[in-house]
Amino acid sequence: MGKRVNMDTKKTSLYQLHQDNNAKFVEFAGYQMPIQYSDGIVEEHKFTRNHSGIFDVSHMGQLFIHGKEDLVNDLEKIFPLDLKKLKLNHSKYSFLMNSDAGIYDDLIITKIENGFLIILNAACKENDFEILSKLLNNKYEMVLDEKRSLIAIQGPKSVEILNDVIKGVEDLNFMTGNWFLLNDKKVYVTRSGYTGEDGFEISVENELADKFTRKLIEKGAKLIGLGARDTLRLEAGLCLYGHELDKGKTPIEANLKWAISKERISKGDFIGSDIIIKQLNDGVQKVRVGIKPEGRIIAREKTKIFNQSDLYIGEITSGTFGPSVNGPVAMGYVENEFSKKDTKVFLEVRGKKHPANICGLPFYKKNYVKGAN
């Protein structure tokens, strides 16, 4: 499929593989990325839910921070996590926040030997690196590693497919990881992902990435584009930076207080903690909710939300057709008093108001593999 490519955009190490599989490309966060392949978004979505999909997420930042004892204390001043209690090779979801508790980025932080691996969003990674370097006073070795690709494999068949290629990954539990050998090279594998399905993310050297991914395809997995990645994460009620999360929203408004350590809240010694504590005590004016349109109408980002008295109460941040739930799904922010489940609201699409209901999240039941950690 011929596409004009901006010569300044970066390409991942799987670019040729995407081309070989007739990918339709879009520019995303400065990279040429596959939005979909020949089967289309709906089929790719269903294949991931029922089988196993491969996602090239090499555009995301892999930040390695190395340091001894002081590092944990310094990072705890930044992230609202109990990092002292985080076990080796265990991961947590967290945020990089400003002093108003606005979110610079949401991220996954994993404790590795002699430091931490932090997975950052593609559009935020350079800025995150600058912010963290400053906050840590350049005290530690920090590498935003461009020599490694990040490949995700997601879906119920992922474990048997990946275990065929990298022996031993089947022993990992959700949100844990470890170093494994692939062709005598070290790869870091975590049992995680962003689709609501069981799956893994594999950090692999760029020169091994293409061959490794082709092996997964040989074993029955299929390449999946960013289009289906978005519908999968939305059905699973998962936030996307730049949509549900940004510098103007706090984790409490985003309904993510579960990701903030209770012990850290009681100490209140991290960036933005005073705002977080105030919002936990006093409540918030706006909050993220799930929204289910009553008909078949799809309410996209920026769609206005009204209450039954025709007053503007918020807006949609993400909306799509959910193939696994066979209907439209959306997330957005509404004034707190209208955030209760089953509250009737109206969505303004193309000048007409359509009925919808506030609903619980996720829309689709998550299938993560939990174990005795």
Image (cartoon, helix red, strand yellow):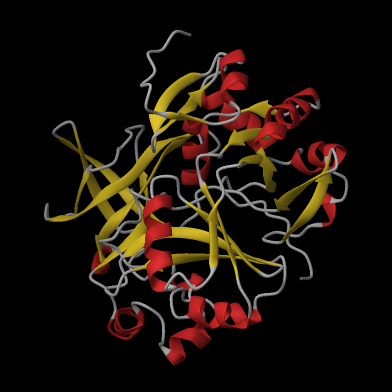
Q: Is residue 107 left or right of residue 298?
A: right
Residue at 81% x, 36% y is 161
From the top left corner, tell me how far across and down residue 93 is, in percent.
54, 64
Seen at 26% across and 43% down, the residue is 355
- Name the residue nearer the viewer: 240 or 335: 240
The x, y position of residue 109, in whole percent, is: 57, 64
For the C terminus, the quadrant is bottom right
- Asked if one can make out residue 255 in the rendered structure from this viewpoint, the answer is no
Measured along the vertical axis of the image, is residue 222 above or below residue 300?
above
Res 271 → quadrant? bottom left
Q: Is residue 250 above or below residue 275?
A: above
Q: Is residue 272 visible?
A: yes
Residue 220 position (above or below residue 245): above
Of 368 and 346, nearer the camera is 368
Q: Which residue is at the far bottom?
A: 267
Q: Position of residue 265 (x, y in %)?
A: 44, 85
Residue depicted at x 43% and y 58%: 129
x, y (%) of residue 339? 31, 63
Q: Left or right? Give the position of 111 relative to 171.
A: left
- Residue 337 shown left or right of residue 41 in the figure: left
| Looking at the image, residue 17 lies above or below residue 275 | above
Residue 353 sits in quarter: top left
Tell me what residue is drawn at x 69 percent, y 45 percent. 202
Q: Nearer the viewer, residue 155 or 133?
A: 133
- Count every numbered label the image shows and give the total: 0
